[in-house]
């Protein structure tokens, strides 16, 4: 099995999960179990792409830990971090760091665009809140949760662009 086939399978899954997350703002645990199934099959039959080592679990465990912290802060949903952790079990180890870099970039880019749009659309109210020192109003305008699966899909596309260009 080549990485091109794995890339295609994950891309189809991300399109579906991204659409459902955008529509419902929730990622079902079924996708996590599907990823566990894929990971088990891939690790069992394609050990040349999936070496079983501690390095395989660094990113998944980190996403569970950091994701829980971000969930407590209200920044990320619980399903987002669980899905991301399970997705890293499906991806070959050699692509973990590169995909992580793409996820950080796509998260910062998406978050910056959303923040900029909120500032532009609510600028008068935001200025009034800032002048009156109504910090909870400023926080309510700026704070936003967005569907994270489309951001992961964007990172996956960036990874594919880097690998094949």
Image (cartoon, grey):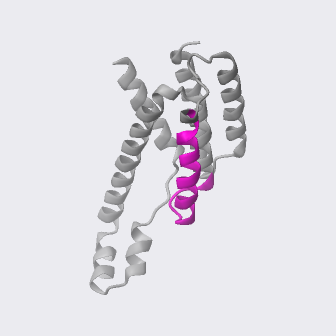
Image-based side of 129 in relation to 97, left or right:
left
Against 45, residue 97 (above or below) is: below
Q: How many marks?
A: 0
Q: Is residue 4 magenta?
A: no
- Who's the residue at 37% across and 75% down the image? 138
Classify 91 as above or below 80. above
For image coordinates 34% across by 58% down, the residue present is: 117
**Front residue of this view, candidates 152 and 44:** 44
At a point 41% along the width and 70% down the height, the residue shown is 141
**Which quadrant of the figure contains the N terminus?**
top right
Question: Is residue 18 visible to us here?
Answer: no
Q: Give the quadrant of residue 40.
A: top right
Q: Residue at x 49, y 40 (%)?
A: 152
Residue 84 image point, x, y percent: 56, 42
Would residue 54 be visible to someone looking at this image? Answer: yes
Q: Position of residue 120 (x, y in %)?
A: 29, 63
Q: Position of residue 147 (x, y in %)?
A: 52, 50
Q: What is the span of residues highlighted in magenta in the rendered image?
A: 56-78
Magenta segment, prevailing SS (helix, strand or loop): helix
Residue extending furthest toward the front: 54
Q: Where residue 109 appears, x then y in whole percent?
A: 35, 47
Image quadrant where residue 102 sits: top left
**Quadrant of the rendering where the C terminus is positioned:** top left
In depth, the one of 142 and 105 nearer the eye is 105
140 horizontally vs 8: left or right: left
Residue 5 to residue 133: above or below: above
Horizontally, is 55 left or right of 101 in the view?
A: right
């Amino acid at each position: 099995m080549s990485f091109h086939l794995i890339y295609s399978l994950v891309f189809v899954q991300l399109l579906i999960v991204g659409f459902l997350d955008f529509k419902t703002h929730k990622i079902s645990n079924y996708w996590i179990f599907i990823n566990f199934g894929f990971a088990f099959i891939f690790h069992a039959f394609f050990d040349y792409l999936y070496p079983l080592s501690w390095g395989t679990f660094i990113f998944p465990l980190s996403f569970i830990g950091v994701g829980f912290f971000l969930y407590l802060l209200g920044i990320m949903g619980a399903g987002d971090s669980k899905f991301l952790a399970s997705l890293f079990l499906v991806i070959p180890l050699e692509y973990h760091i590169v995909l992580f870099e793409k996820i950080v970039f796509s998260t910062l880019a998406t978050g910056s665009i959303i923040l900029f749009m909120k500032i532009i659309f609510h600028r008068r109210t935001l200025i009034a809140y800032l002048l009156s020192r109504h910090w909870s109003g400023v926080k309510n305008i700026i704070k936003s949760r967005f569907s994270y699966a489309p951001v992961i899909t964007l990172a996956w596309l960036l990874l594919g662009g880097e690998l094949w260009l």
